[in-house]
Amino acid sequence: MYDNLTFIDAAVADNTSGLDTMDGHELLLADLQSLEPSCILLFIMTGKVLLNILIFGARCRNVGASLMACCCLSLAVVDLLLLCAISTIHYFQDFTILGFRVTSHHICLFTQITSHTYGILHLPFFLASGLDYYLTIVKSIHISYGWSALLYTACVVLLWAGAFAYVLLSPAELPEVDPEQSSYLCSFYISSQAFYLSLCLVGSIVFGLVLCCSEMAAFLKSLKVISFAENTVVLFSLTPGDKGPIQGGKHLVAALLFTFLGSWVPFVVLQVIILVLSAPIPAYMDMNVPWLYFMNSFLLGVSLGLKYPDFQVSEKTLSRDPFVAWKYCVLPFMYSEQIMDTSLLKEPLSPVRIV
């Protein structure tokens, strides 16, 4: 697909304004005459890699084996490899490796290929992870840690290989550019998958809030914030005075939404702003580790909702989400005999917990 580097001259930029749309094609960046594309890409990718490190370091606890966890790790590795590649090319400018000449123009080319690959992986990652949670949580299919890790790794490798193969083998129409002109614009792929997937997720959250508005109101009225063992604890009770588990599917949905939004409401607001503005974001920025963890929390919450009322979940299952304390959300809806793993009740409280 990218046998030749795609550069669009500034003189013809006005004739290609239709590319900056969210139809799954390309986005033209601002005029880069005053700053080389390599400098901008280095700055952005460095920030993205640092964000990955921050996200992995900020996880509340160790993550259990899941397909989405492997997807997050693989994305971080690809980001780091891309940063190393463009940094090396930017430093040496023009060199030959294994008989292949590499110049500064390849910074844009490599980023274009990676960006297009990122852009077509949103839906495959989402569907594959959803199937993983449906089989392992809803259907309670148990696989040993060794086999599950091998299966997840193979699945992620196949997804990446298939995406790269599709990008490299797909035909592309490249604009004619005068090679003697030095000023250019570097174009990047815009993922329509990311836009529509974000729209579906935000729409589902809003629909859940509307559906359970009365339960959410009762939920907030019963909320209390106390201090226990030098920690801040958020307490709620949808059925005050009852000793048994809380009953009702809408009550569970309200609890799941409250727990989910307690961790991800800033990210949800960001998604709403992007959707309202229809902001075209290059795919190499749009596909990121926080976005994958956001989808991971959403899928895990949906899986727990589908599992109700037959809650047979363990600490291993709930540890698949490093940011949302689902354990304290589902415990009020479980009978004592449904708690398979007694460690659910033994973990010490973290600074902020919803119980």
Image (tube, grey):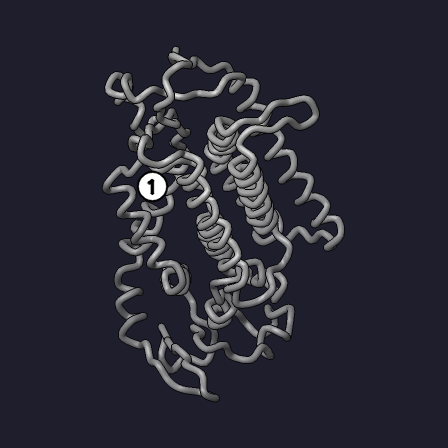
Image height check: is 67 above or below 316?
A: above
Q: Is residue 127 visible?
A: yes
As helix, strand or loop, the secondary structure at mark 1 comes to helix
Q: Nearer the viewer, residue 235 or 66?
A: 66
All told, the count of numbered labels is: 1
- Name the kind of residue labelled 1 in the image: Leu
Picture coordinates of residue 239, whole percent (x, y): 36, 75
Image height check: is 237 above or below 276?
A: below
Left or right placement of residue 83 versus residue 7 in this view:
right
Q: Nearer the viewer, residue 129 or 274?
A: 274
Picture coordinates of residue 139, whole percent (x, y): 60, 50
Picture coordinates of residue 94, whole percent (x, y): 56, 28
Residue farthest along the bottom direction in this orientation? 229
Left or right placement of residue 113 versus residue 77 in this view:
left
Residue in view at x 28 percent, y 38 percent: 279
Q: Nearer the viewer, residue 308 or 91?
A: 91
Residue in view at x 38 percent, y 82 percent: 241
Residue in view at x 53 percent, y 41 percent: 87
Quadrant of residue 261 within the rendered picture: bottom left
Q: Is residue 133 visible?
A: no
Picture coordinates of residue 181, whole percent (x, y): 36, 17
Image height check: is 209 above or below 169?
A: below
| Label 1 crowd bin: few (<14), some (14–19), many (20+), radius 10 Å | some
Q: Nearer the viewer, residue 313 or 68?
A: 68
The residue where tag 1 is placed is 199
Residue in view at x 53 percent, y 57 percent: 53
The quarter in which the C terminus is drawn is bottom left
Image height check: is 236 above or below 112?
A: below
Left or right placement of residue 56 versus residue 31 in this view:
right
Quadrant of residue 19 within the rendered picture: top left
Quadrant of residue 187 within the rendered picture: top left
